[in-house]
Amino acid sequence: MATAAIVILAGTESHADLGRLVNGLETAAEFADNPNDEVELLFDGAGTQWIPELEDESHDYHGLYRSIRNEVVVCDYCANAFGVDDVVDEADIITADENGGHPSIRSLVEDDSEIITF
């Protein structure tokens, strides 16, 4: 059994950022496909900008995103700071705010999650 927190920090500005997003989605899907594993896909910082794009059914990676949608968590503070909080709310995505409006990475480590950033 493995426990992982996949953290998407890459913004939406470049092809390289898209590559990091896709690698993160595929890694999260690999964990989600294993019934003995636990995974959380956390969008933090500029990574929160991906939520409106991935919620769009015409996005190339919408299907992959939807396949692991139940694992998605978004930083509450960053969703607001990057102007995507309305989309996050509309999509009924869980937000994390345990650490001054941000997710608690320490709690994830304390829970023995392997932290993998993209």
Image (tube, rainbow, N blue to C red):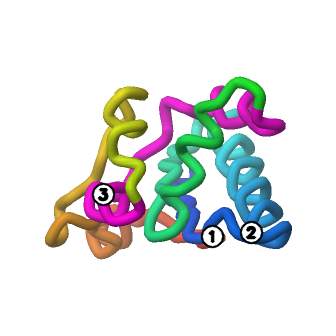
Corner quadrant of residue 61: top right
Which of the 4 quarters of the picture holds residue 36? top right
Q: Name the residue under label 3.
A: 80
**Residue located beneath label 1 in the image:** 10
Residue 52, percent from left and from top: 55, 41
Contact check, label 3 and label 1, Cβ < 8 Å: no
Residue at image position (85%, 67%) is 15
Magenta run includes residue 56: no
Tell me where the magenta segment starts and ends, as one range.
59-82
Q: How crowded is mark 2: few (under 14 residues within 10 Å), some or many (20 or more)?
A: some
Badge number at residue 17: 2
Task: Tell me what residue is drawn at x 17 percent, y 61 percent.
Answer: 98
Disc on the earlier residue, 1 or 2: 1
Element type at mark 1: loop
Q: Which circle, 3 or 2, is nearer the viewer?
A: 3
**Depth check: 27 or 66 in front?**
66
Q: Is residue 68 magenta?
A: yes
**Main SS of the magenta segment?**
helix
Q: Nearer the viewer, mark 3 or mark 1?
A: 3
Q: What residue type is labelled 2?
A: Asp
Q: Position of residue 18 (x, y in %)?
A: 78, 61
| SS category of the residue bearing label 2 | helix
